[in-house]
Image (cartoon, rainbow, N blue to C red):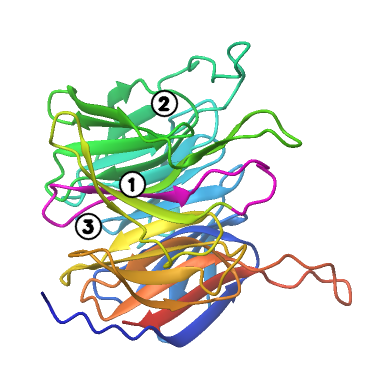
Amino acid sequence: MSDLSVSLQSQQKYTLPTGVLDCEVSADGRMLYAACMDGVYQVPLDGGEPQRLYEHESYASGVHLDPHRDVLISAGYDGQLVWFDLSRRTIFRRVLAHRFWSWQSARSPDGRLLATVTGQYMVGGEKYEPAAETEPSVKVCDVATGEMLHAFSHVPSVQSVCFSPDSQHVAAGNLLGQIRIWNVKDGAKVADWKTDAFTSWGIIKSHCYIGGIFGLVFSPAGDTLLAAGMGPMTDPMAGNGRQLWQRFAWQENPPRLVDQTHDGESGEGLMEAIAHHPSRPLFLMGGRLRGGDWNAAAFSAEDGRRLQHVNTNYRITQARFTPDGGRVILAGFDKQKGPEKGEYPKFGMLEVFSV
Protein backbone atom coordinates (compact mmCIF):
# COMPACT_ATOMS: atom_id res chain seq x y z
CA MET A 1 0.00 0.00 0.00
CA SER A 2 1.32 3.44 -0.89
CA ASP A 3 2.32 6.05 1.65
CA LEU A 4 -0.68 8.35 1.54
CA SER A 5 0.16 10.99 4.10
CA VAL A 6 -1.99 14.01 3.31
CA SER A 7 -2.00 17.43 4.93
CA LEU A 8 -4.62 19.83 3.62
CA GLN A 9 -3.43 23.28 4.71
CA SER A 10 -5.04 26.52 3.56
CA GLN A 11 -2.52 28.79 1.81
CA GLN A 12 -4.55 31.48 0.04
CA LYS A 13 -8.14 32.61 -0.06
CA TYR A 14 -9.84 34.82 -2.65
CA THR A 15 -13.32 36.30 -2.63
CA LEU A 16 -15.29 37.13 -5.78
CA PRO A 17 -18.47 39.22 -6.07
CA THR A 18 -20.75 36.22 -6.69
CA GLY A 19 -20.76 32.45 -6.23
CA VAL A 20 -18.30 30.25 -8.13
CA LEU A 21 -19.76 27.26 -10.00
CA ASP A 22 -16.59 25.97 -11.68
CA CYS A 23 -12.89 26.70 -12.03
CA GLU A 24 -9.90 25.74 -14.16
CA VAL A 25 -6.20 26.10 -13.35
CA SER A 26 -3.57 26.88 -15.97
CA ALA A 27 -0.91 24.33 -16.95
CA ASP A 28 1.79 26.25 -15.07
CA GLY A 29 -0.39 26.53 -11.96
CA ARG A 30 -0.13 30.32 -11.89
CA MET A 31 -3.57 31.38 -13.14
CA LEU A 32 -7.09 30.35 -12.23
CA TYR A 33 -10.26 30.90 -14.23
CA ALA A 34 -13.63 30.92 -12.47
CA ALA A 35 -17.18 30.53 -13.79
CA CYS A 36 -19.39 32.69 -11.58
CA MET A 37 -22.97 33.84 -11.32
CA ASP A 38 -21.97 37.20 -12.86
CA GLY A 39 -19.47 36.02 -15.47
CA VAL A 40 -16.05 34.50 -16.04
CA TYR A 41 -13.06 35.70 -14.00
CA GLN A 42 -9.29 35.46 -14.26
CA VAL A 43 -7.56 35.08 -10.88
CA PRO A 44 -3.75 35.28 -10.55
CA LEU A 45 -2.60 32.74 -7.96
CA ASP A 46 0.38 34.93 -7.04
CA GLY A 47 -1.94 37.22 -5.11
CA GLY A 48 -2.96 39.61 -7.90
CA GLU A 49 -6.44 41.06 -8.24
CA PRO A 50 -9.20 39.01 -9.92
CA GLN A 51 -10.51 40.43 -13.19
CA ARG A 52 -13.86 39.76 -14.84
CA LEU A 53 -13.31 38.85 -18.49
CA TYR A 54 -16.86 38.56 -19.85
CA GLU A 55 -20.43 37.54 -19.04
CA HIS A 56 -23.03 34.99 -20.08
CA GLU A 57 -26.69 35.96 -20.32
CA SER A 58 -27.21 33.98 -17.10
CA TYR A 59 -24.89 32.21 -14.66
CA ALA A 60 -21.61 30.87 -16.06
CA SER A 61 -21.55 27.22 -14.99
CA GLY A 62 -18.37 25.83 -16.55
CA VAL A 63 -14.94 27.06 -17.66
CA HIS A 64 -12.20 25.24 -19.59
CA LEU A 65 -8.83 26.08 -21.12
CA ASP A 66 -7.94 24.95 -24.62
CA PRO A 67 -4.47 23.41 -24.10
CA HIS A 68 -3.54 23.96 -27.76
CA ARG A 69 -4.52 27.63 -28.06
CA ASP A 70 -4.69 30.70 -25.83
CA VAL A 71 -8.44 30.26 -25.58
CA LEU A 72 -10.99 29.88 -22.81
CA ILE A 73 -14.33 28.11 -23.33
CA SER A 74 -17.23 28.55 -20.93
CA ALA A 75 -20.74 27.15 -20.54
CA GLY A 76 -23.72 28.80 -18.90
CA TYR A 77 -27.29 28.61 -17.71
CA ASP A 78 -28.15 30.45 -20.93
CA GLY A 79 -27.37 27.17 -22.72
CA GLN A 80 -24.48 28.77 -24.58
CA LEU A 81 -20.87 27.77 -25.08
CA VAL A 82 -18.61 30.81 -25.42
CA TRP A 83 -15.07 30.94 -26.86
CA PHE A 84 -12.84 33.74 -25.53
CA ASP A 85 -9.43 34.72 -26.95
CA LEU A 86 -7.21 35.38 -23.92
CA SER A 87 -4.60 37.30 -25.93
CA ARG A 88 -7.03 39.61 -27.69
CA ARG A 89 -9.44 39.74 -24.77
CA THR A 90 -12.46 39.16 -26.96
CA ILE A 91 -15.28 36.67 -27.54
CA PHE A 92 -15.01 35.12 -31.01
CA ARG A 93 -17.60 32.34 -30.98
CA ARG A 94 -20.95 31.55 -29.37
CA VAL A 95 -22.75 28.24 -29.82
CA LEU A 96 -26.24 27.54 -28.47
CA ALA A 97 -25.81 24.01 -27.13
CA HIS A 98 -29.09 23.73 -25.17
CA ARG A 99 -32.47 25.42 -24.84
CA PHE A 100 -32.15 24.96 -21.06
CA TRP A 101 -29.22 25.29 -18.64
CA SER A 102 -25.84 23.72 -19.08
CA TRP A 103 -25.70 22.07 -15.68
CA GLN A 104 -22.10 20.97 -16.05
CA SER A 105 -19.44 20.71 -18.74
CA ALA A 106 -16.11 18.95 -19.22
CA ARG A 107 -13.15 19.16 -21.58
CA SER A 108 -11.42 15.98 -22.76
CA PRO A 109 -7.83 15.49 -21.50
CA ASP A 110 -6.45 15.69 -25.06
CA GLY A 111 -8.13 19.07 -25.48
CA ARG A 112 -10.12 18.12 -28.59
CA LEU A 113 -13.65 17.77 -27.20
CA LEU A 114 -16.05 19.58 -24.90
CA ALA A 115 -19.13 17.93 -23.38
CA THR A 116 -22.10 19.69 -21.80
CA VAL A 117 -25.24 18.32 -20.12
CA THR A 118 -28.73 19.71 -19.61
CA GLY A 119 -32.29 18.75 -18.75
CA GLN A 120 -35.22 19.93 -16.66
CA TYR A 121 -37.06 17.63 -14.27
CA MET A 122 -40.69 17.79 -15.38
CA VAL A 123 -43.24 15.28 -14.13
CA GLY A 124 -43.94 12.62 -16.73
CA GLY A 125 -46.58 10.48 -15.00
CA GLU A 126 -48.55 9.62 -11.86
CA LYS A 127 -45.42 8.28 -10.15
CA TYR A 128 -43.66 11.60 -10.72
CA GLU A 129 -41.06 9.97 -12.94
CA PRO A 130 -39.24 12.49 -15.16
CA ALA A 131 -40.82 13.29 -18.49
CA ALA A 132 -38.80 12.43 -21.57
CA GLU A 133 -36.17 14.91 -22.65
CA THR A 134 -37.23 17.66 -25.06
CA GLU A 135 -33.74 17.88 -26.54
CA PRO A 136 -30.63 15.66 -26.33
CA SER A 137 -29.34 15.85 -22.78
CA VAL A 138 -25.66 15.30 -23.60
CA LYS A 139 -23.81 17.22 -26.31
CA VAL A 140 -20.19 16.82 -27.45
CA CYS A 141 -18.52 19.45 -29.61
CA ASP A 142 -15.18 20.05 -31.31
CA VAL A 143 -13.12 22.52 -29.26
CA ALA A 144 -11.29 23.92 -32.29
CA THR A 145 -14.34 24.60 -34.47
CA GLY A 146 -17.39 24.56 -32.18
CA GLU A 147 -19.02 21.91 -34.38
CA MET A 148 -21.46 19.61 -32.58
CA LEU A 149 -20.22 16.06 -33.06
CA HIS A 150 -22.61 14.05 -30.88
CA ALA A 151 -26.04 14.49 -29.28
CA PHE A 152 -26.78 11.69 -26.81
CA SER A 153 -30.07 10.80 -25.15
CA HIS A 154 -30.44 10.52 -21.37
CA VAL A 155 -33.18 10.95 -18.74
CA PRO A 156 -33.39 14.54 -17.44
CA SER A 157 -32.11 16.21 -15.51
CA VAL A 158 -28.51 15.27 -16.35
CA GLN A 159 -26.30 17.00 -13.79
CA SER A 160 -22.76 15.65 -14.20
CA VAL A 161 -20.34 14.77 -16.99
CA CYS A 162 -16.69 13.74 -17.42
CA PHE A 163 -14.25 12.26 -19.93
CA SER A 164 -12.05 9.21 -19.51
CA PRO A 165 -8.28 9.81 -19.20
CA ASP A 166 -7.70 8.55 -22.76
CA SER A 167 -10.40 10.93 -24.07
CA GLN A 168 -12.22 7.99 -25.69
CA HIS A 169 -15.33 7.92 -23.48
CA VAL A 170 -17.74 10.40 -21.93
CA ALA A 171 -19.89 9.61 -18.88
CA ALA A 172 -23.02 11.43 -17.68
CA GLY A 173 -25.11 11.01 -14.52
CA ASN A 174 -28.63 12.19 -13.72
CA LEU A 175 -31.22 12.94 -11.05
CA LEU A 176 -32.24 9.28 -10.71
CA GLY A 177 -28.71 7.93 -10.34
CA GLN A 178 -28.55 6.67 -13.91
CA ILE A 179 -25.08 6.66 -15.48
CA ARG A 180 -24.47 6.27 -19.20
CA ILE A 181 -21.13 6.05 -20.99
CA TRP A 182 -20.52 6.52 -24.71
CA ASN A 183 -17.58 5.99 -27.02
CA VAL A 184 -16.91 9.41 -28.54
CA LYS A 185 -15.31 7.99 -31.68
CA ASP A 186 -18.37 6.17 -33.02
CA GLY A 187 -21.10 7.39 -30.63
CA ALA A 188 -21.88 3.89 -29.32
CA LYS A 189 -23.33 3.60 -25.82
CA VAL A 190 -21.03 1.18 -23.96
CA ALA A 191 -22.47 1.23 -20.42
CA ASP A 192 -25.82 2.06 -18.82
CA TRP A 193 -26.70 1.39 -15.18
CA LYS A 194 -28.45 2.85 -12.16
CA THR A 195 -27.60 3.33 -8.50
CA ASP A 196 -30.39 4.16 -6.05
CA ALA A 197 -27.97 5.50 -3.45
CA PHE A 198 -28.06 9.17 -4.49
CA THR A 199 -31.76 9.86 -5.09
CA SER A 200 -34.54 10.74 -2.63
CA TRP A 201 -38.30 10.45 -2.92
CA GLY A 202 -39.87 13.00 -0.64
CA ILE A 203 -42.57 11.78 1.74
CA ILE A 204 -42.50 15.01 3.76
CA LYS A 205 -43.27 18.46 2.28
CA SER A 206 -42.33 17.68 -1.33
CA HIS A 207 -43.52 14.57 -3.14
CA CYS A 208 -40.92 14.45 -5.91
CA TYR A 209 -37.48 13.14 -6.74
CA ILE A 210 -34.46 15.11 -5.60
CA GLY A 211 -30.71 14.60 -5.51
CA GLY A 212 -28.88 12.48 -8.04
CA ILE A 213 -25.27 12.40 -9.16
CA PHE A 214 -23.55 15.79 -8.97
CA GLY A 215 -19.97 14.80 -9.72
CA LEU A 216 -18.24 12.15 -11.84
CA VAL A 217 -14.56 11.34 -12.42
CA PHE A 218 -12.76 8.39 -13.97
CA SER A 219 -9.78 6.87 -12.19
CA PRO A 220 -6.38 7.72 -13.75
CA ALA A 221 -6.27 4.19 -15.21
CA GLY A 222 -9.76 4.69 -16.64
CA ASP A 223 -11.08 1.35 -15.39
CA THR A 224 -13.33 2.69 -12.62
CA LEU A 225 -15.69 5.65 -12.28
CA LEU A 226 -16.36 7.67 -9.13
CA ALA A 227 -19.74 9.30 -8.51
CA ALA A 228 -20.53 11.90 -5.83
CA GLY A 229 -23.74 13.18 -4.27
CA MET A 230 -25.83 12.63 -1.16
CA GLY A 231 -27.66 9.67 0.32
CA PRO A 232 -31.48 9.40 0.43
CA MET A 233 -33.68 11.56 2.68
CA THR A 234 -37.35 11.33 3.64
CA ASP A 235 -37.61 15.14 3.78
CA PRO A 236 -36.01 16.36 0.54
CA MET A 237 -35.78 19.90 1.91
CA ALA A 238 -33.64 18.85 4.89
CA GLY A 239 -30.37 18.35 3.03
CA ASN A 240 -29.31 15.78 5.61
CA GLY A 241 -28.46 12.85 3.37
CA ARG A 242 -25.17 11.03 3.85
CA GLN A 243 -22.03 12.53 2.28
CA LEU A 244 -21.51 9.89 -0.38
CA TRP A 245 -19.16 8.64 -3.07
CA GLN A 246 -19.40 5.35 -4.95
CA ARG A 247 -16.83 3.68 -7.20
CA PHE A 248 -17.89 1.43 -10.10
CA ALA A 249 -16.02 -1.01 -12.33
CA TRP A 250 -17.86 0.32 -15.37
CA GLN A 251 -16.33 -2.01 -17.97
CA GLU A 252 -17.87 -5.08 -16.34
CA ASN A 253 -21.29 -6.27 -17.49
CA PRO A 254 -23.23 -5.22 -15.53
CA PRO A 255 -21.07 -2.49 -13.96
CA ARG A 256 -20.11 -3.46 -10.41
CA LEU A 257 -20.09 -1.35 -7.24
CA VAL A 258 -16.51 -1.63 -5.97
CA ASP A 259 -16.57 0.63 -2.91
CA GLN A 260 -18.34 3.58 -1.34
CA THR A 261 -18.01 5.99 1.57
CA HIS A 262 -17.14 3.87 4.56
CA ASP A 263 -19.39 3.69 7.61
CA GLY A 264 -18.36 6.18 10.27
CA GLU A 265 -16.45 8.39 7.81
CA SER A 266 -19.24 10.67 6.61
CA GLY A 267 -21.52 13.35 7.93
CA GLU A 268 -24.52 14.92 6.22
CA GLY A 269 -24.66 17.15 3.17
CA LEU A 270 -24.69 17.26 -0.61
CA MET A 271 -21.32 16.47 -2.22
CA GLU A 272 -20.89 18.35 -5.51
CA ALA A 273 -17.17 18.09 -6.32
CA ILE A 274 -14.93 15.07 -6.81
CA ALA A 275 -11.40 15.03 -8.25
CA HIS A 276 -8.55 12.53 -8.57
CA HIS A 277 -5.00 13.54 -7.69
CA PRO A 278 -2.91 13.65 -10.91
CA SER A 279 -0.16 11.32 -9.66
CA ARG A 280 -0.98 9.87 -6.23
CA PRO A 281 -3.65 7.21 -5.46
CA LEU A 282 -6.08 9.54 -3.72
CA PHE A 283 -9.14 11.62 -4.51
CA LEU A 284 -10.90 14.57 -2.90
CA MET A 285 -14.63 15.09 -2.44
CA GLY A 286 -16.33 18.29 -1.29
CA GLY A 287 -19.70 19.98 -1.02
CA ARG A 288 -22.06 21.25 1.66
CA LEU A 289 -22.09 20.54 5.39
CA ARG A 290 -25.45 19.82 6.99
CA GLY A 291 -24.28 17.68 9.91
CA GLY A 292 -20.86 16.49 11.03
CA ASP A 293 -17.42 18.08 11.01
CA TRP A 294 -16.25 18.21 7.37
CA ASN A 295 -17.29 19.29 3.90
CA ALA A 296 -14.05 18.38 2.10
CA ALA A 297 -12.06 15.19 2.56
CA ALA A 298 -9.25 13.26 0.91
CA PHE A 299 -9.71 9.50 0.43
CA SER A 300 -7.43 6.65 -0.56
CA ALA A 301 -8.08 5.39 -4.08
CA GLU A 302 -6.61 2.04 -3.01
CA ASP A 303 -8.86 1.11 -0.11
CA GLY A 304 -11.36 3.99 0.19
CA ARG A 305 -10.38 5.06 3.70
CA ARG A 306 -10.66 8.72 4.61
CA LEU A 307 -7.22 10.28 4.94
CA GLN A 308 -7.92 13.82 6.11
CA HIS A 309 -10.86 16.18 6.27
CA VAL A 310 -11.51 19.91 6.68
CA ASN A 311 -14.47 22.20 7.19
CA THR A 312 -14.21 25.26 4.93
CA ASN A 313 -17.39 26.87 6.33
CA TYR A 314 -18.69 27.48 2.81
CA ARG A 315 -20.35 25.40 0.10
CA ILE A 316 -17.88 23.72 -2.29
CA THR A 317 -18.93 23.40 -5.93
CA GLN A 318 -15.63 22.38 -7.55
CA ALA A 319 -12.19 20.97 -6.69
CA ARG A 320 -9.21 21.23 -9.04
CA PHE A 321 -5.70 19.90 -8.41
CA THR A 322 -2.80 21.85 -9.90
CA PRO A 323 -1.01 19.86 -12.62
CA ASP A 324 1.92 19.09 -10.30
CA GLY A 325 -0.47 17.84 -7.60
CA GLY A 326 1.03 20.06 -4.93
CA ARG A 327 -2.13 22.11 -4.40
CA VAL A 328 -5.87 21.80 -4.72
CA ILE A 329 -8.22 24.72 -5.36
CA LEU A 330 -11.67 24.60 -3.79
CA ALA A 331 -14.35 26.83 -5.30
CA GLY A 332 -17.81 27.70 -4.07
CA PHE A 333 -20.19 30.02 -2.22
CA ASP A 334 -20.25 31.62 1.19
CA LYS A 335 -23.58 32.64 2.69
CA GLN A 336 -25.06 35.56 0.78
CA LYS A 337 -25.61 38.47 3.16
CA GLY A 338 -27.65 41.63 2.93
CA PRO A 339 -26.23 44.99 1.87
CA GLU A 340 -23.74 46.79 4.08
CA LYS A 341 -23.56 50.56 3.56
CA GLY A 342 -25.36 50.13 0.26
CA GLU A 343 -23.11 47.36 -1.09
CA TYR A 344 -23.53 43.60 -1.08
CA PRO A 345 -20.58 41.70 0.42
CA LYS A 346 -18.69 39.32 -1.85
CA PHE A 347 -19.70 35.68 -1.44
CA GLY A 348 -17.78 33.79 -4.13
CA MET A 349 -15.00 31.69 -2.63
CA LEU A 350 -11.71 30.34 -3.99
CA GLU A 351 -9.29 28.71 -1.56
CA VAL A 352 -5.90 27.16 -2.28
CA PHE A 353 -4.77 24.23 -0.12
CA SER A 354 -1.44 22.45 -0.04
CA VAL A 355 -1.80 18.68 -0.34
Q: Is residue 90 left or right of residue 78?
A: left
* Residue 307 visible, this orientation: yes
Q: Secondary structure at mark 2?
A: loop
- Magenta stretch: dominant secondary structure: loop
* Residue at 10 percent of width and 74 percent of height: 1
Residue 246 at x, y = what percent? Answer: 33, 50
Q: Secondary structure at mark 3?
A: loop
Residue that extends furthest to the right in the rendered view of this protein:
341
Residue 231 at x, y = what percent? Answer: 49, 48
* Residue at 23 percent of width and 71 percent of height: 323
Q: Is residue 200 left or right of residue 246?
A: right
> In the displayed structure, would residue 1 be above or below residue 240?
below
* Residue type, label 3: Pro
The disc, 1 or 2, on the residue closer to the chain's N-terminal end is 1
- Locate the C terminus and report the quarter of the image it occupies: bottom left
Label 2 belongs to which residue?
Answer: 137
* Residue at 19 percent of width and 52 percent of height: 109
Label 3 belongs to which residue?
Answer: 67
